[in-house]
């Protein structure tokens, strides 16, 4: 049975920064309160021309560069987002087209902030089963578009960004070692974005009622998160026959510093084993775990051979954890150096030609009908 290794990684974060002081100009809050209750100092907010697909494409190409893998070799793309580009088509398909992943199947996975753990596990399982060799997992968000900037309960928390992993099959032991996924829909009301779906299609009323914004019972989510984070990490470790002593790093979902502290206490692990960057990014939902991981790799914290636990929670309610051995890019079988970024030009050209052909085909088929 092949192993599923994480062989490439990349992130894309919008440049504009929104500080707590900036938010204090919009709602009745202040920097001290936000830092005390959440640990957040600032977050990045997408520009008008940045979307989940554009951030996701950038992160994906960087991940392919690290893995030295051509987009044409990807078998499966799973994009996970709490702020997808559309209800359909899937953001994954837009990314597939724009990076030139010509043979990949692509779909979106919705598990809110647990999405990256769910998606990485699904991709790893597809590789472990032998049905595919190369997968791309992307978590990407422009949640700022769904935030009510007059609601101090939510607008202090979230930020935008994207992260991607490449997963590849190898006979060498390592990579994804175990994972657990959980859900409890009885807590669905705690964190919602109700408008625009089939239950509340967009109308003037849904707009007036604020149904197109994120709504949250902060205390309920806080209680749920502190209950499940440590438990899920422990469960995934048990499945992999490991203990916290075998682990070099825990990469938690970056929602709130205090929630991470509670998980550390539950696991009896020091805070310096936790990768934390919530102070600079806020909660980037599905992108938070890959953004934290990639920063830790770039800062030389996470090294090849390290064992890590990814653990997260979110709306649904959903939660989960995944244990992985960080092995880095697979040793190249050929000396060929791939330039995934160069495929973008051909991908755009190919997309344009296919649209043109579809248009011409439409003209002829109309005459036939
Ligand atoms: N600035 C200043 N004061 C604020 C405030 C803000 N942004 N938001 C709330 N307050 C006030 C409240 O009105 C309340 O005042 P009161 O005591 O006079 O009524 C007081 O601060 C305490 O509010 P409370 O809601 O109890 O704060 P809290 O300690 O629960 O913190 C959250 C609020 C949102 C930071 C916290 O509940 C949380 O982080 N929850 C989890 C959210 C989360 O992670 N969501 C994403 C999941 S993926």
Image (cartoon, helix red, strand yellow):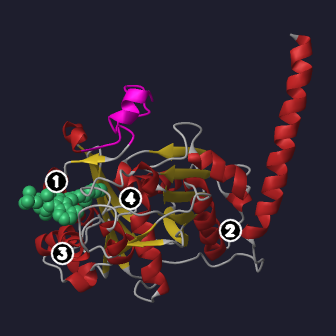
Q: Considering only order in the chain, which callout, 2 or 3, is on the residue closer to the N terminus?
A: 3
Look at the numbered disc 4 and say if its residue's Cβ is closer than 8 Å to ligand 1.
yes
Q: Say whether marks 2 and 1 touch (CB < 8 Å).
A: no
Residue 123 appears at what percent x and percent y? 49, 54
> Is 360 covered by the magenta stretch?
no
| Residue wearing tag 4 | 285
Look at the numbered disc 2 and say if its residue's Cβ is closer than 8 Å to ligand 1.
no
Is any atom of residue 226 visible in this view?
A: no
Q: Nearer the viewer, mark 1 or mark 3?
A: 3
| Residue wearing tag 2 | 69
| Residue wearing tag 1 | 224
Residue 174 appears at what percent x and percent y? 44, 71
Please determine whether, in this image, residue 243 is positioned above or below residue 58. Answer: below
Residue pictured at 79% horizontal, 54% vertical: 348
Cα distance in 3D space between marks 1 and 3: 20 Å
Q: Is residue 7 left or right of residue 313?
A: right
Q: Residues within 10 Å of mark 3 (few under 14, many from 20)?
A: few
| Residue wearing tag 3 | 36
Helix, strand or loop at label 3? It is: helix
Region in magenta = 191-212
């Amino acid at each position: 049975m092949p192993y599923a290794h994480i062989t490439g990684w990349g992130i894309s974060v919008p440049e504009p920064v929104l500080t707590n002081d900036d938010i204090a100009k919009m709602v009745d809050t202040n920097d001290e309160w936000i830092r005390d209750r959440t640990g957040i100092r600032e977050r990045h907010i997408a520009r008008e021309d940045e979307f989940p697909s554009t951030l996701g494409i950038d992160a994906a190409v960087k991940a392919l560069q690290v893995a030295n893998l051509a987009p044409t070799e990807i078998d499966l793309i799973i994009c996970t987002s709490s702020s997808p580009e559309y209800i359909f088509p899937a953001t994954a398909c837009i990314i597939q087209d724009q990076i030139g992943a010509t043979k990949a199947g692509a779909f979106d996975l919705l598990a809110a902030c647990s999405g990256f753990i769910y998606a990485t596990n699904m991709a790893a399982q597809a590789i472990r089963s032998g049905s595919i060799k190369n997968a791309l997992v992307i978590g990407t968000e422009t949640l700022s578009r769904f935030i009510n900037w007059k609601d101090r309960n939510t607008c202090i928390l979230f930020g935008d960004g994207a992260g991607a992993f490449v997963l590849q099959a190898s006979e060498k032991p390592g990579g994804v070692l175990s994972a657990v996924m959980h859900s409890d829909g009885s807590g669905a009301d705690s964190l919602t974005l109700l408008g625009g779906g089939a239950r509340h299609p967009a109308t003037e009323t849904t707009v007036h009622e604020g149904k197109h914004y994120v709504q949250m019972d902060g205390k309920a989510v806080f209680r749920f998160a502190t209950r499940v984070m440590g438990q899920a990490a422990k469960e995934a470790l048990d499945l992999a026959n490991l203990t916290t002593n075998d682990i070099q790093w825990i990469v938690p979902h970056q929602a709130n510093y205090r929630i991470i502290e509670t998980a550390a206490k539950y696991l009896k692990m020091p805070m310096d084993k936790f990768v934390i960057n919530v102070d600079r990014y806020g909660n980037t939902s599905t992108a938070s775990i890959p953004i934290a991981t990639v920063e830790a790799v770039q800062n030389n914290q996470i090294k090849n051979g390290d064992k890590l636990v990814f653990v997260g929670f979110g709306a649904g309610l959903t939660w989960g954890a995944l244990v992985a051995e960080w092995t880095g890019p697979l040793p190249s079988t050929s000396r060929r150096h791939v330039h995934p970024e160069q495929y973008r030009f051909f991908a755009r050209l190919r997309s344009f030609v296919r649209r043109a052909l579809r248009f011409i085909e439409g003209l002829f088929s109309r005459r036939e009908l």
